[in-house]
Amino acid sequence: MKTITKITILLFTYSVGAQTAFHNYGNIKMHTNASIGFHTDLTNDGTLDNSNEGLAGFYSNNETRIVSGNNKATFYNVEIDAANNLELRNSLGITNELSFINGKVITPRSNSDISLDFILHDFYAGEDDNRHVDGYTTVLGSEEFTFPIGDDNRLRPMILPTQNQNATFKGAYFNEDPNSPNTFAQSFLTNQKQVFIENISQLEFWDLKGANKTTITLTWDNQSDIAAITNTIEQLKVVGWSKTENKWIDLGNSNVSGDLIKGEVTSNEFIPNDYEIITIGSGIADGSLNDVNIIFSPNGDSTNETLVFEGIEQYNKSLLEVYNRWGNLVYKTTNYKNDWNGKSNGRATIKENDDLPVGTYFYTLKFGQDNLNKKQKGWVYIQR
C-alpha cells in the first residue's frame, strides 16, 4: 500500500452502496515526496489543481475505479493499477509522469471534453494493448508526443511532431468503419472523396482536434488490412473528412515506412479542426489511368471559373495537356496550380490567350512526388 504523507486538505468521504468515495470540497496541496493512494473513487468538487510534487495512485483489484466531480483533478506523477480500469467522468491532469501498471483509462467517446490530459509534459510508460487510453487524450506542450490511445484491447497510437510553440491537441482512436461509425452522428462515406484518392480504410479512423497547423503520423498493424487499400505502401497517405466539403480530402504523404503488416505514414501540414476524422488512404497507383470527367464555366461569375483537380497541391510535379476533338494541343503547363481558365496557349488557335469555344476537350494529367509516375485522363467540358 502507498504511504500517505502530510497534505493540507478539507475533504469528506461517503458511501455509495458498498463503495466508499474520496470527496474533496476544499483545497488540496501535496508537498515534497507526498503520495496519496486512491483505493476508492475520487470525486473532486474543490481545488485539486496546484500539485507540482508527489505521486497519486489509483488502485483496484476488482472494481472499476472512477474519477468524477465538477472540477478537474491534476497531479504531478500518476500511476494506474486498476485491473478493471480507471473510468474518467471528468478530466484528469498530469504534469509530469504517468505509469500504466494495470488496466486502461476509459473516457466517454461521446464527450471529447473529458480526457486524460498531459500538461506541459508528455512522459509515460507501460502502454500496450491492455494498458492505454480507451477514449480521448489531450496534450499541451511543444515536444513530440505519441498519443497512448486505443480501442478495447488494441493500442493504436498516432504521433504528433515537435511544435514551434506550446499548443493543445486532442486525439482518440476508433476501431470502426467510417461508413457506419458507432460514436458519431454522421457517416463518412468512403466513396465521397477527391479524385486522387483511390481507396480509404473501412476498418479504423482517428479523431484529432487542434487549432494549430501540424503534421500527424498514423500507424497500422496486422489488423488494419493495408493490403485491401494498396499493395505498395508508398501509395499510402493520410486522408481527412472535410467539415466544409463533406468528403475525404488528401492530406498528403511526407513520409512512409514499414510493410503491409506494420508501419506508419506522415501527412503534410493541415489544421486538424478543419476535419471531422482522419484515417489512412491510398493514392492513384503508378502509371494508372482513371477516367475523370469535369465541367467548368469560365464566364466571369466567380463560380467554377477554373479547371480544378482537388489534391494536386499534394504533389511536387505535374504536367497537364489539353487537346481539342481533333487531337490538337490547346493547353499545356507544368506544375499545375488549378488556374486554367479555358484560354489556349497551343498552336491550334489563331493566337495565344484566345478563349476556347464551348465544347468538349480531352486531357491527360501526369503527376507525382519526385517524377511523373502517375497518370489520369478524361474529358473536360467548357461552358460559358
Image (tube, rainbow, N blue to C red):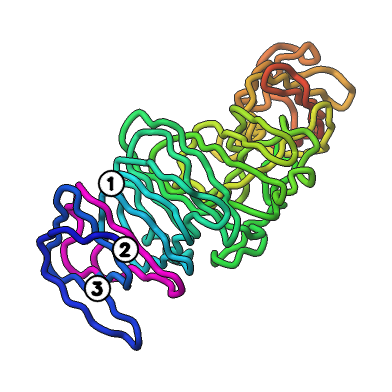
Residue 233 appears in the figure: yes
Q: How many marks?
A: 3
- Read off the residue under disc 2: 1
Residue 56 sits inside the magenta stretch: yes
Mark with earlier residue (3, 1): 3
Residue lying at 80% horizontally and 27% vertically, measured from the top left: 286
Bounds of the magenta segment = 44-72
Looking at the rendered structure, the secondary structure element under dot 3 is: strand
Q: Callout 2, which amino acid?
A: Met
- Which quadrant of the rendered structure holds the C terminus? top right
259 left or right of 128 in image: right
Residue 143 x/y as whole percent: 38, 33
Circle 1 SS class: loop
Q: Which mark is residue 95?
A: 1
Identify the amino acid type marked 3.
Phe
Residue bearing mark 3: 22
Name the residue located 68 percent from the left edge and 16 percent from the top edge: 334
